[in-house]
Image: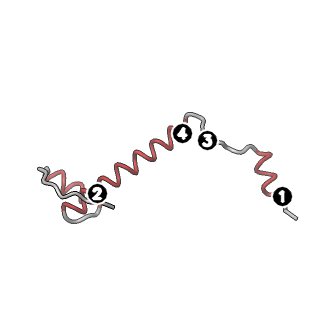
Amino acid sequence: MGYQKTTVEIDIEQLRTAQEHLHTRGVKDTVNAALREINRRAALAGAADYVLEGKLHVPDDEAWASWREPRS
C-alpha cells in the first residue's frame, strides 16, 4: 500500500464531524477512514445495481432442495 504526502486545506468543522462519525483521531486517520468508507459505499452500490439489474443468479426451490438432500 502506497502513501503520498500532500498539503490540503481542510474545513475543520467538517473534519471534527467526520471524526465523530468515523470514531477517528487526527487528520490522517480521519481522511484515510473517509476514503475507505466512500470506496466501501461505492462497492455496495455496485453490488446493489448488479442485483437490481437481475444479474445475480438466485437458486430456485428445486435447487435448494437438491442441495439439502443427503449425499452418499
Q: Where, quadrant-wise, is the N terminus in this rendering? A: bottom left
* Residue sitting at x 47%, y 42%: 46
Mark 3 or mark 2: name the one nearer the start of the chain. Answer: 2
Q: Is residue 46 left or right of residue 9?
A: right
Residue placed under numbered mark 1 in the picture: 69
Label 4, residues with CA under 10 Å away: few <14, some 14-19, many ≥20: few
User: Of circles 1 and 3, which is in front?
Assistant: 3
Mark 2 or mark 1: name the one nearer the start of the chain. Answer: 2
**Secondary element type, mark 1:** loop
Instruction: Using the image, determine if residue 32 lies above or below residue 11.
Output: below
Residue placed under numbered mark 4 in the picture: 50
Report the amino acid beneath label 2.
His
Residue placed under numbered mark 3 in the picture: 56
Q: CA distance from mark 2 to mark 1?
A: 47 Å
User: Of circles 4 and 1, which is in front?
Assistant: 4
Q: Is residue 45 left or right of residue 14?
A: right
Q: CA distance from mark 3 to mark 4?
A: 7 Å
Instruction: Using the image, determine if residue 24 lies above or below residue 61.
Output: below
Mark 4 or mark 1: name the one nearer the start of the chain. Answer: 4
**Secondary element type, mark 4:** helix
Q: How many marks?
A: 4
**Secondary element type, mark 2:** helix
Q: CA distance from mark 3 to mark 2?
A: 32 Å
- Residue 41, horizontal then vertical, whole percent: 40, 48
Q: CB of mark 2 within 8 Å of CB of mark 1?
A: no
Mark 3 or mark 4: name the one nearer the start of the chain. Answer: 4
- Residue 47, horizontal then vertical, whole percent: 50, 44
**Secondary element type, mark 3:** loop
Residue placed under numbered mark 2 in the picture: 21
Q: CB of mark 3 within 8 Å of CB of mark 4?
A: yes
Q: CA distance from mark 4 to mark 1?
A: 30 Å
